[in-house]
Image (cartoon, grey):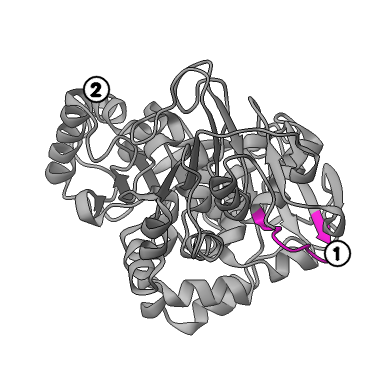
Amino acid sequence: MNHTITEKIIAAHCAPKGEKEVFPGEFVETDVDIALSNDITSPLAIKQFRNIGVKKVFDRNKTVIVLDHFTPNKDIASAEQCKFIRQFAREQNIKYFFDGGNCGIEHALLPEQGIVLPGNLVIGADSHTCTYGALGCFSTGVGSTDIASVWASGKVWLKIPETIKFIYEGKKNKWVYGKDLILYTIGKIGVDGANYKAMEFTGSVIRKLPMTERLTMCNMSIEAGAKSGIVEPDEITMEFVRRTKSGRNLKSKFMGQWLDLKSDRAVDYCNLVEINVSKIEPQVALPHLPSNTKPVSKLGTILVDQVVIGSCTNGFLEDMRIAAGILKGKKVHKYVRLLIFPATPEIYRQSLKEGLIDIFIDSGGIVNPPTCGPCLGGHSGVLAKGEKCISTTNRNFCGRMGHLESEVYLSNPAIAAASAIAGRITGVR
């Protein structure tokens, strides 16, 4: 039988390994390579894990906990929550426990550290765990109680998703990035257009797309209702992996095996969606859905109070460079707050070396530590009633960044930086 890359990866993790074909709609039990949780989802998982009665997690080297949402702790409740998690991490001797100065936004941190790799099966108590599909692995989000079960058993039940193949062809226009491709796609199919499907991103445009932009696209597959997003591993994937800590220690034979991870040619996809990117200009998602997208040139005058550049979608070094290139020598509008969130300590450090942080500060921006911050209305940029924000984050639901009567607009970092200067949402001129 012919199978998609998603089906092949899941089948390889079924017991007995490699001896089972899987088909859409089938329920299977699989081994888990990485089990992820954060400071919001870990406490409930810990309580449920203890209720199960198991003393030790299935593998301390495959358990990852990242304290990135309400950190540095915004109040007493979040401080108590993180203290509770730290005690558990110490008790379990968790290898990949990230806190304080070692911490970063989880979905940028794990790929950078080489913790997730092609062919892996990754389960995370965070909906944007689907990010890692950009590396050619199957990754999806689950609830805290599911993570507790994985910690106890090292396994998870999955329903095999059908796969939609998205084919991107043509030539990208200037100032168009992976963020625009996925916003356009979500606008085309809707927030439930890929409900419980795997979104497989292919085509000549994807094959040339940098890894960070692939990560952004897979990250936002959940915004179309998808179970996962995935890109077949290629030389761009391999080069990215080689630069990570794990990649530098891996033998080259693994690279060849990963390059063989592909969907069969005769696969019967549940749907094929062809997109001509030559017709796509920078996109903006208007309140209150990521699918409510328009080309930036089609917007009227929308004044903004705040601009956020960062998050697990666009807090990568490349995003910092794009924003700094536009802000250099210019000033943020006097009535706009510009907040910058480099996604990891390494990205922050490299931004310092390249002088990007100086550019942000000189322009009037506020540079924050690597944290999710205002993305989910957590802290460091919560909106007041009636305020408008254009952000490189991934969600703009009602009240997502603060007050229920505030508004969030989504864009790429170039549009966000240009809007910070203009004081209104605008293209790069």
Direction from residue 276 to residue 92 in the image, left or right: left
**In-front residue for pair 116/295:** 295
Q: Residue at x 33, y 68 (%)?
A: 352
* Residue 422 vertical position relative to residue 109 in the rendered view, above or below: above
- In the image, residue 188 lies at what x, y percent? 81, 38
Foreground of the two, 253 or 127: 127
Magenta range is 167-178
Residue drawn at (21%, 55%), measured in percent from left and top?
101
Residue 110 showing in the rendered view: no
Q: Position of residue 395 (x, y in %)?
A: 56, 34
On the image, which quarter does residue 351 sit in?
A: bottom left
Residue drawn at x 79%, y 57% is: 2
* Residue at figure coordinates x 31%, y 29% from the top left: 45
Q: Position of residue 363 (x, y in %)?
A: 43, 56
State the SS at label 1: loop
Left or right, residue 100 beside residue 345: left
Q: Disc 2 or disc 1, which is closer to the eye? A: 1
The residue pinned by badge 1 equals 170
Q: Spatial distance from mark 2 to mark 1, Cα to Cα? A: 54 Å
